[in-house]
Amino acid sequence: MISSIGLDIVEVARIERDIKQYGDRFVSRILSRAELAAFDKRVDAAIFLAGRFAAKEAVIKALDRYFEDRPAFNVIEIINDAGGKPELRLPQEIQDRMGQAHCLLSITHEKNYAAAVAVFEEGQ
């Protein structure tokens, strides 16, 4: 059964401006260490970061059902599996508070925008 859903869209140009203005400080506030390793290898860094930003906002919106306080962006980790599908990884203390909830996540990119949806299911 679906227990919560989050959706977000980000303008890629906004992320590009933030990268130029704040550099690594901005990027490291958004990405986990594993995500930073992937980011550093990307030629489409701004689009990649915009997608992760949108996905993390979507996850945070969906997590509102479970928490009153927002987790930091860089503790929410989104890693692609071998087939390229994004998978959500959360710290154990967050997972413990969520019970059996499982997240389905989708990220899409277009020239000017990145968007994501996070759907949490329970009882699967």
Image (tube, helix red, strand yellow):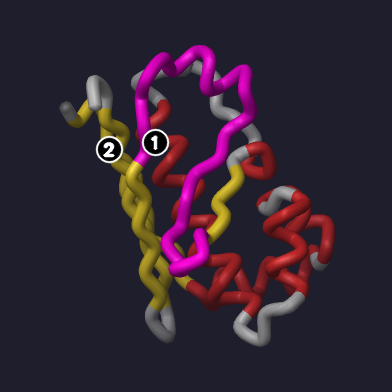
Q: Quadrant of residue 65?
A: top left
Q: How many marks?
A: 2
Q: Quadrant of residue 6?
A: top left
In this view, the residue in front, 46 or 94, is: 94
**Disc on the earlier residue, 1 or 2:** 2
Residue identifier under label 2: 5
Q: Quadrant of residue 92?
A: top right
17 to the left or right of 21:
left
Image quadrant in which the C terminus is located = top left
Name the residue located 40 percent from the left edge and 75 percent from the top edge. Answer: 109
Please say whether residue 84 is one of the residues in the magenta stretch: yes
83 to the left or right of 31:
left
Query: Would you place residue 90 above or below residue 23 in this image?
Result: above
Residue identifier under label 1: 61
Report the disc number at residue 52.
none
Query: Would you place residue 59 above or below residue 9 in this image?
Result: above
Name the residue located 61 percent from the left edge and 83 percent from the top edge. Answer: 44
Q: Are marks 1 and 2 in contact (CB under 8 Å)?
A: yes
Please say whether residue 7 is one of the residues in the magenta stretch: no
State the image coordinates of residue 94 (x, y, percent, origin top left).
56, 21
**Type of the residue with mark 2:** Ile
Image: magenta residue range = 81-103
Image quadrant in which the N terminus is located = top left
Query: Would you place residue 53 above or below residue 90 in this image?
Result: below
**Type of the residue with mark 1:** Lys
